[in-house]
Image (spheres, rainbow, N blue to C red):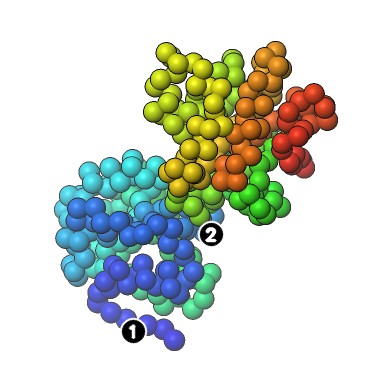
Amino acid sequence: MQEQHKDFWPPGALIKHLTDKRDIPRRRPVELRGEYEIHALDISALKLNVGYFAPFIIPKRLSAHKTISAANLEDLLPDLHEQVRESREPFVVLVVGGMIENEAAIMQRFCNRSVAVISHHDIESIVNAPDQEAAWDALSNPLVRYLGRQALSPYRPGRPAFGGRFFGRLEALHRASAGGKLGGNFTIMGNRRIGKTSLLREIKARLLRDNARLKTADIYGNNFHSGYEVAKEMLEHLRPDLARRLPSEPHLIENLPAHISFIPEKQNEDVAVFIDELDHILEFDAREDYRLLNLLRATFEHERCRIFFAGFRRVMEAKNRLDTPLITSRKPFPLPA
């Protein structure tokens, strides 16, 4: 049954409708920041260039306005730009319940501002949509109007994908998130340009989406030349208090398992580390008698600590060699072409 047409829609009514009636998940509690309500909604189902925490922002100063002027919206732009920067999402969505005066002119001024505006007519279209598909189309319309199709396109050749830009690899995603030990540790193997980095990023995004108490570290193997450098980078992300001491106390690396297990045991937080381009790490770690891999194997035996590797030829060789710690501690997952 369709809603009655109204002259004004409270902005909060749209958020409630999306979460209660249209199966749009709310990924974080409502944040009150100054005069703004910020709702982190997961609109990745729309398959746009967006992650899992798209900020839908309600400005209290305009929440009861039946008409919205260009001056009203332009006054908000500095704050909205700051929200884009802090959220690290491609754009924010401003929700107002009133009708916008001269929207065509406002859209020109908002061009390339990373802000989409949902107003009276859009809310009415979404709420009165006859089914889920029509509601998602109605929700996409203002995003396309303000941000443009190119900015929203999930296809970015040569760039890793995640969130709304990620397609397929469902088996790998299910394996990475199911089972005991919070899903276990994984090594992803495959040829160049097959999607290993995209899969790593999508796993990370989904783990963060579902666990507010997760600390993560990203390691890109080609940037390092020794196991010490890799371990130091990991501590920079997970234990910066210890990383600051390393120049004068390099022996701290030897106790890496204890330092990382401190996080779940004393801080009650989970740990996930993502290491891309493992091939390069294997090359120098072999010369160091696999000191780093042995440390990592001991570290990530903890049930609340997980590690994800991605690599190519050397990783494929290492999984079959008995003298490589990789074979005794990881579940290899080859990606089909």
Who comes first in sequence, dot 2 or dot 1?
1
Toward the viewer: 143 or 46? Answer: 46
| Residue at (44, 86) in percent of width and height | 1
x and y, in percent, of residue 113 in the image: 32, 44
Question: Amino acid under label 2?
Answer: Ala
Q: Residue at x 39, y 22 (%)?
A: 244
Q: Position of residue 40 (x, y in %)?
A: 39, 56
Q: What residue is at 36 percent from the left and 67 percent from the top?
A: 15
Q: Which residue is mark 2?
A: 45
Residue located 26% across and 71% down the image: 10
Residue pointed to by mark 1: 4
Q: Is residue 244 in view from this perspective?
A: yes
Residue 168 appears in the picture as rendered = no
Residue 20: % across, % down: 43, 73
User: Judging from the image, what secondary structure is the residue with disc 1 in?
Assistant: loop
Residue 10 against residue 257 in the figure, above or below: below
Q: Is residue 87 above or below residue 193?
A: below
Crowd rating for badge 2 (residues with CA inside 10 Å; few <14, some 14–19, many 20+): some
Which residue occupies the extreme bottom position in the image?
Answer: 1
Q: Is residue 108 left or right of residue 157?
A: left
